[in-house]
Amino acid sequence: MSVWKQWGLEPIINASGAVTRLGGAPMPPEVLEAYVLASRESVPLDQVQGLASRVLAQHTGAEAGLVTSGAAAALTLGSAAILAGYDLSRIEKLPNTEGLANEFVVAREQRNGYDHAVRAAGVRLVEVGFHEIIAGSGVRRVEAWEYEAAIGPRTAGVLYVQDRDARPPLAEVVAVAHRHGLPVLVDAAGELPPRANLRRFLEQGADLVAFSGGKAIRGPQGTGLLVGRRELIGSAALQLLDLDEHWELWQPPPELIERDRLRGLPRHGIGRGFKVSKEQILAVLTALDRFVHSPVEIKIPLILLERLAQQLAGIPCQLCLPLEEESMPTLEIQVVKQSAIEVCRRLRHGSPPIYVGHGKLDRGRLIIDPLHLDEQTLPRLAQRLREELSERTAE
Ligand SMILES: *Cc1c(COP(=O)(O)O)cnc(C)c1O
C-alpha cells in the first residue's frame, strides 16, 4: 500500500514534469541508495562540501562549487558572496547593506519571482531596458549598453536569468560587467538539459551559476548547485556552514575556504537557515554523475505519449518534439467547447488527482509531460482525459 495513503494523503498522477510544487522529479534508485548509505556514517559537513566542490569542479569546469538547498538558496548565497566576500564585518551584517555597494543590474524583462532570493541577501535590483516586442510598442529588447549606463559607485554585480531566448547574449553582458570589475551571477536553475550547459555559462564568463538539483538532474528536490569562482564560492560556503567551532581547531578544506585570508571565524551567516544534509549532498552528487554520463533517453517517453495520443482518439492533440537538445517531448491537448481551467480543476479533483502541465491554459491547451508517467499510470490517465474531454465535447 502507498505510504502516503497510510498517512492519509492520496498520491497524484503527475503529468506535468519535474515541478517543485508537486514534489519534483523522481529520484533514480542509485540516488536513493546513496542517500541511505550516506546516513550510516558520520562525516564533517565542511569536508562533505569540499568533496562536493571537487566533484562540481570536475563536471562543470568551475574553480569550485557548493551544494545548496535549491537553486533559490544558491542565488541568495551567491548574492551574499558578491556583497561580502571574505569581509567578516560584512558577513556579520547581511542582509543589512547600509553603506555598502549593494546594487545588481538586471534586465527588466528578466525580473521574475525567484529574484526575491537575490533581494533576500540585501541586494537592490536596478532594472534596465524594455521588451518592446512583448509590449507591442516596437522591435527592440534590452541591449548591452543599457547595463553599462546603469553601473555606478553603488553597483556590486549583475544578475542574469538564463533562458534559450535570453537577450542580450550572456557573453555580451559579461564583457560589460567585467570591464567594470563586476561579477555576473547567472540563474540557470532550469537550464538543464542540455548537459553542455553545465559548462557553457562558465565558459561564457559567468562568475557564479546556480542550478537546481531537483529538476532534470533528479537529485533530492531540496538541493541546488552553486558553481563558479573559488573566492566567491568560499564566501558562500562560509555563510552557509555551521561555524560553531574553535578557530584554533577549525581546518576547512582548502579547496573550498581559504582560512589564511580570515582574521577569525565568522558567526553563523545569512545561509545558516539553508542547511543541506550530508545525505542530500551525496545524493545530488550521485544524481549529477548519472546525469552527466547517461544521455537523455526520449524513446520510451515518446512511445508512452504516442500510445496516450492513440487512446485519446478523437480528442485534438499534438505531439511536440523537444526544441532543445536532450529535452523531453510533450503532448499538447487542445480543449474545445469548454474551459481549460475547468478541465484542469476536474482532473485535480478526481481520484487519483491528476495534475497536467498548465503553462498554456490561456490558449486552451493541456500539456502532458512524460517524466513521471509509466505503463501503470498511463491507462488511468487516458481514461480520465477521455471522460473529461470526449464526452463533454460531444454534449
Ligand atoms: C526552478 C527555478 C528556481 C528555483 O529552483 P529551486 O531548486 O527549486 O530552488 C530559480 N530560478 C528559476 C528560473 C527556476 O526555474
Image: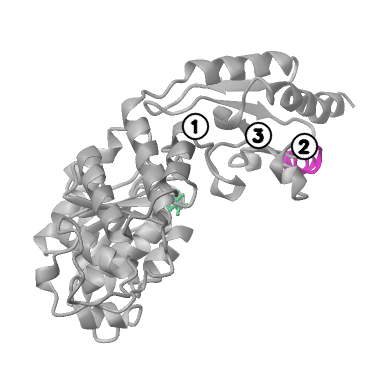
Amino acid identity at mark 3: Leu
Q: Marks 1 and 3: CB-CB under 8 Å?
A: no
Question: Of circles 3 and 2, which is in front?
Answer: 2
Residue 381 percent coordinates (x, y): 72, 27
Residue neighbourhood size for the residue with mark 3, other residues' Cα within 10 Å, grouped as few (<14), some (14–19), many (≥20): many
Question: Of circles 1 and 3, which is in front?
Answer: 1
Amino acid identity at mark 2: Pro
**Residue 69, visible in the rendered structure:** yes
Q: Quadrant of residue 56?
A: top left
Q: Left or right of 266: which side holds 28?
A: right
Please state which of residues 293 and 205 is positioned toward the viewer in this rendering.
293
Distance (Cα) linking label 1 and label 3: 30 Å
What colour-coding does the image apply?
one colour
- Kindly identify the residue that appears in the image at 9 percent across and 70 percent down: 260
- Kindly identify the residue that appears in the image at 41 percent across and 46 percent down: 38
Magenta portion: prevailing SS class:
helix
Look at mark 1 in the image and give the residue it sits on: 29
Task: Name the quarter where the N terminus is drawn.
Answer: top right
**Secondary structure category for the residue under label 3:** strand
Amino acid identity at mark 1: Pro
Say which label, 3 or 2, has the lower sequence index. 2
Look at mark 2 in the image and give the residue it sits on: 352
Residue 42 percent coordinates (x, y): 37, 55
